[in-house]
Image (tube, rainbow, N blue to C red):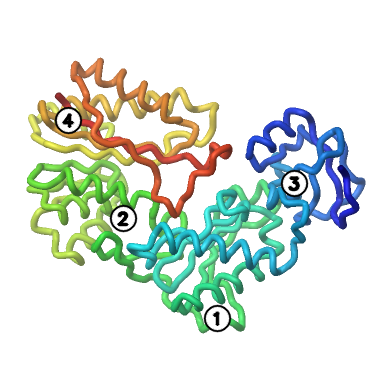
């Protein structure tokens, strides 16, 4: 039944209603059937079915195709400071539970998965690196930042700085400017250096929260790196798309006989090499700056010998329109990697695009194996680490696939 509430009301289509009731938190512009003449951009609005049933409340974005992003489906919620403080507390409490082995560096807020749509917060020791990608969150970010600092203080973490990595192009779709830099507030000290050190799985990394990719480091593969490290013991490892060397370093620390780390970026290769020295692993590692697509067939021609190949490429697609070409790219590198491996060798392969779903990815791997003339045994099937939670009904949160296979 419709109740008197202080928020503007939007009525959505039956298709949208079914999607919202199934747990997806987005309303697209073409799903809205009735709307008020004026509603402030970034403000909280109510979403109703065509029959007047309450479906949720969310943040309005007048410029985005995602017109409303739900904050709550509880009609009793009021979206004041206490609401956002509770959301921050719930997010941090969850990470304390699932990352209890190491809370020092992890994702504290994962957007829609934490009912804070368009917000990413990564914790690197006592520095927070933040992306705000929705205009509604931009309006309340001061409240959220203060809540993060206050809540972390209760758990013994004194935040030294909040880096805003608002340099993502998606902000422009929300009508917001791109920028990056330290957030300044009277509850924070003078900004520290943007370059800091973190320790993950016992490995030390230098992280640049100002200039590093995304928020500075890829935290979602933490436990997948440990799974690869167990396989790597005593083996000759080829780590492709190494970036700053995280899989390669875990393999070396796990007792690999030798690790070759490859990336097309010279800066990434240099950083990976520095990280090897930082962890005293340089004696069992070498580094190559090359295009993996060109390198893999060349290594096969040269008769290179590896026992374990790791493929952790960047997202080959960020839309459904390019999924076909992305699939061909995934198949090529997996096919080439399989041809490098002997019987008994291992392949770790990943995709970080949610458009490349698990079923499609596995079909691609099987097709590559058929073309390579090999049979694969599945060792492990994994996802992103639990600080990047997957919410049933929100397919976009289920983005990372990671598989380990053995050639038999």
Q: Secondary structure at mark 4?
A: helix
- Front-most of 97 and 39? 97
Q: Which mark is residue 56?
A: 3
Q: Earlier in the sequence, mark 2 or mark 3?
A: 3
Of badges 4 and 3, the one in the foreground is 3
Residue bearing the label numbered 1: 188
Q: Quadrant of the N terminus?
A: top right
Of badges 2 and 3, the one in the foreground is 3
Q: Position of residue 253 (x, y in %)?
A: 16, 56
Q: Earlier in the sequence, mark 4 or mark 1?
A: 1
Q: Secondary structure at mark 1?
A: loop
Q: Position of residue 71 (x, y in %)?
A: 68, 52
Residue bearing the label numbered 4: 298
Residue bearing the label numbered 2: 267
Vertical arrangement, residue 245 with respect to residue 128, above or below: above
- Is label 2 in contact with label 4 (beta carbons under 8 Å)? no
Circle 1 packing at 10 Å, graded few (<14), some (14-19), many (20+), is: some
**What residue is shown at x 55% (from left), y 58% (from top)?**
131
Circle 3 packing at 10 Å, graded few (<14), some (14-19), many (20+), is: many
Q: Position of residue 238 (x, y in %)?
A: 18, 41
- Which quadrant of the structure image shows residue 312? top left
Vertical arrangement, residue 170 with respect to residue 279, above or below: above
Vertical arrangement, residue 124 with respect to residue 234, above or below: below
Q: Earlier in the sequence, mark 3 or mark 1?
A: 3
CA gap between label 3 and label 1 equals 35 Å
- Is label 4 in contact with label 1 (beta carbons under 8 Å)? no
**What residue is shown at x 25% (from left), y 56% (from top)?**
272
Of badges 3 and 1, the one in the foreground is 3
Q: Earlier in the sequence, mark 1 or mark 2?
A: 1
């Amino acid at each position: 039944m419709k109740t008197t509430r202080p928020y503007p009301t939007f009525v959505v289509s039956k298709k949208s209603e079914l999607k919202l009731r199934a747990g997806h938190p987005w309303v697209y512009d073409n799903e809205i059937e009735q709307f008020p003449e004026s509603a402030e951009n970034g403000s909280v609005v109510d979403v109703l079915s065509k029959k007047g049933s309450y479906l949720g409340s969310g943040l309005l974005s007048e410029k985005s195709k995602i017109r409303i992003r739900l904050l709550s489906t509880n009609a009793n919620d009021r979206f004041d400071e206490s609401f956002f403080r509770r959301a921050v507390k719930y997010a941090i409490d969850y990470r304390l539970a699932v990352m209890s082995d190491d809370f020092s560096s992890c994702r504290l807020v994962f957007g829609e998965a934490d009912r804070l749509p368009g917000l990413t917060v990564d914790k690197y020791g006592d520095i927070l690196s933040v992306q705000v990608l929705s205009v509604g969150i931009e309006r309340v970010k001061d409240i959220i930042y203060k809540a993060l600092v206050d809540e972390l203080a209760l758990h013994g973490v004194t935040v030294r700085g909040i880096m805003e990595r608002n340099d993502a192009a998606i902000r422009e779709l929300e009508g917001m400017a791109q920028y990056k830099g330290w957030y300044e507030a009277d509850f924070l000290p003078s900004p520290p250096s943007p370059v800091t050190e973190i320790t993950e799985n016992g490995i030390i990394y230098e992280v640049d929260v100002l200039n590093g990719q995304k928020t500075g480091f890829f935290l979602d593969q933490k436990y997948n790196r440990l799974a690869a490290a167990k396989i790597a013991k005593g083996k000759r490892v080829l780590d492709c798309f190494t970036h700053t060397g995280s899989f390669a370093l875990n393999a070396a620390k796990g007792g690999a006989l030798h690790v070759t780390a490859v990336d097309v970026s010279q800066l990434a290769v240099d950083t990976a090499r520095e990280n090897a020295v930082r962890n005293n692993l340089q004696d069992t590692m070498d580094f190559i700056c090359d295009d993996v697509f060109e390198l893999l067939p060349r290594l096969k021609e040269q008769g290179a010998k590896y026992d374990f190949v790791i493929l952790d490429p960047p997202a080959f697609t960020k839309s459904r329109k390019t999924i076909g070409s992305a699939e061909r790219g995934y198949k090529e590198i997996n096919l080439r990697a399989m041809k490098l491996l002997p019987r008994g060798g291992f392949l770790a392969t990943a995709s970080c695009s949610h458009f490349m779903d698990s079923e499609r990815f596995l079909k691609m791997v099987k097709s590559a194996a058929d073309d390579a003339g090999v049979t694969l045994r599945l060792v492990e099937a994994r996802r992103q680490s639990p600080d990047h939670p997957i919410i049933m009904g929100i397919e976009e949160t289920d983005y990372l696939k990671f598989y380990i296979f053995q050639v038999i």
